[in-house]
């Protein structure tokens, strides 16, 4: 006996929630993320779905077709991720996983028999909140990120991905081994919309903006906060502060997005002029040309300010994702089968973008977000819209698996 969407949602929503903020902490391979993964595996077992895992821990649970000749063939995979940003919202990722399970339940209850396998996927470390690499699991599965580079990544506590996997009882020597893509004929990801552009309950994605994460290192000279004259200082915090303001202005002028959301200061003392400030910029734009121009303008202004401050600045790209234009034929087909659902772009990155770049026919469905807030405890979607998303996903799966 399968549970309703509401019950599934309530069960998963209890895992990793901070009672003081209402936000979620499910970093990759942490105890709470592992607990959520265990919940997913239990749900798959209850449905008799055969779970396939690759070396990094991506999971796909298969509902095989009724016709024996269709078993084992490439199928339709849907799903999302279970990890979260630091103090994130409940819907980003998990909504796609719970909706996938519920859509399969709905199709089975209707007596639908797929002609090709239908897979329910849960992909690891999509947010990159622990190891700084977004869509880590899908990048490794598609070969975009090599096992050597992946295993050398470190979290903020200095724990390497190699060690984190070992502690989570995942064999690091198997990272990079994956057969999941060989069976992924089509991928459809349902996700909460992360802005206010969608006014209908459900929409279809047209594209993902190009985006990336860029590390700025500002280096100066540590000194005493009380005795060092203002004119004698080489303060990298000033260079950083001007750069953050420049990023805000340049993004507004370009109609783009630029955010310094993470900062590390050395020696990080209240009464000391810093010796170094490391800041991470998240930048996104509607085109690669606009993104490149935005980064050039920010870096130029940072360098000019550093010269005045007697500091230095270095910018290193940590991850860059090109624009993703989802296949118009598949996109328009899904919009039509959903009654001409609205089609809209997104500035947020997703595993769907990585799979699309790997040549897999890919589409995304969005569920309305009434406030537009995301990556925050205030992230929200109405239950009626979530249920509309399940119905839409079931309709799409039926269309693609006939």
Image (cartoon, grey):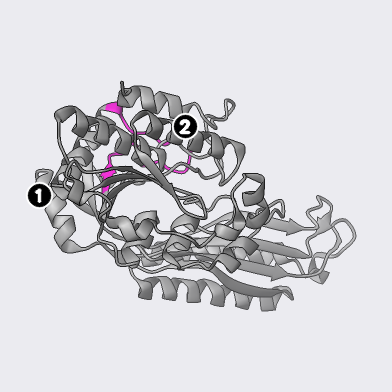
Q: Which of labels 1 and 2 is toward the front? A: 2
- Front residue of 53/288: it is 53
Q: Which residues are magenta?
A: 365-383
Q: Considering the image in quadrants, where does the N terminus appear?
A: top left
Task: Give the CA distance from mark 1 to mark 2.
Answer: 34 Å
**Where 141 sits versus 18, above or below?**
below
Q: Which residue is mark 2?
A: 39
Q: Which residue is mark 1?
A: 336
Numbered disc 1: secondary structure: helix
Q: Residue at x 16, y 47 (%)?
A: 115
- Front residue of 396/335: it is 396
**N-terminal label among 1 and 2:** 2
Q: Which mark is residue 237?
A: none
Image side of residue 44 versus residue 115, left or right: right
* x then y, percent, for residue 22: 52, 29
Q: Residue at x 16, y 40 (%)?
A: 395
Give the prevailing secondary structure in the magenta stretch. loop
User: In which quarter of the view is residue 278 placed?
Assistant: bottom right
**Where 226 sits versus 375, above or below?**
below
Numbered disc 2: secondary structure: helix
Q: Residue at x 73, y 70 (%)?
A: 219
User: In which quarter of the view is residue 45 placed?
Assistant: top left
């Amino acid at each position: 006996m399968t549970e309703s969407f509401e019950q599934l949602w309530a069960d998963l929503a209890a895992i990793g929630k901070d009672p003081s903020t209402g936000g979620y902490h499910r970093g990759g391979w942490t105890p709470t993320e592992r607990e959520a993964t265990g919940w997913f595996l239990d749900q798959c077992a209850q449905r008799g779905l055969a779970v396939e895992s690759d070396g990094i821990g991506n999971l796909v649970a298969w509902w095989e077709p009724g016709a024996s000749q269709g078993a084992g063939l490439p199928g339709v995979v849907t799903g999302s991720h279970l990890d979260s940003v630091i103090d994130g919202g409940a819907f980003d990722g998990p909504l796609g996983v719970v909706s996938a399970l519920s859509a399969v339940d709905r199709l089975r209850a209707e007596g639908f028999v797929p002609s090709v396998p239908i897979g329910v996927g849960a992909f690891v470390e999509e947010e990159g909140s622990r190891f700084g690499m977004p869509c880590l699991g899908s990048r490794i599965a598609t070969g975009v990120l090599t096992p050597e580079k992946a295993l050398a990544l470190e979290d903020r506590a200095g724990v390497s991905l190699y060690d984190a996997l070992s502690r989570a009882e995942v064999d690091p020597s198997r990272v990079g081994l994956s057969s999941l893509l060989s069976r992924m004929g089509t991928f459809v990801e349902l996700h909460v919309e992360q802005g206010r552009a969608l006014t209908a309950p459900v929409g279809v994605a047209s594209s993902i903006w190009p985006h990336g994460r860029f590390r700025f290192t500002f280096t100066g000279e540590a000194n005493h906060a009380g005795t060092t004259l203002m004119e004698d200082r080489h303060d990298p915090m000033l260079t950083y502060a001007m750069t953050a303001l420049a990023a805000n202005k340049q993004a507004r002028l370009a109609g783009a997005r630029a955010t310094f959301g993470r900062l590390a200061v050395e020696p990080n003392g209240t009464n000391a002029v810093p010796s170094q400030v490391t800041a991470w910029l998240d930048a996104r734009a509607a085109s690669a040309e606009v993104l490149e121009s935005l980064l050039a303008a920010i870096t130029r202004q940072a360098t000019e300010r550093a010269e005045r401050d007697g500091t230095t600045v270095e910018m290193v790209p940590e991850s860059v994702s090109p624009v993703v234009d989802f296949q118009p034929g598949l996109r328009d087909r899904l919009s039509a089968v959903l009654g001409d659902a609205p089609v809209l772009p997104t500035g947020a990155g997703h595993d769907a973008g990585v799979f699309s770049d790997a040549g897999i026919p890919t589409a995304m469905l969005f569920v309305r977000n009434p406030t537009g807030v995301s990556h925050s405890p205030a992230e929200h979607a109405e239950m009626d819209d979530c249920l509309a998303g399940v119905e839409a996903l079931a309709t799409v799966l039926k269309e693609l698996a006939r």
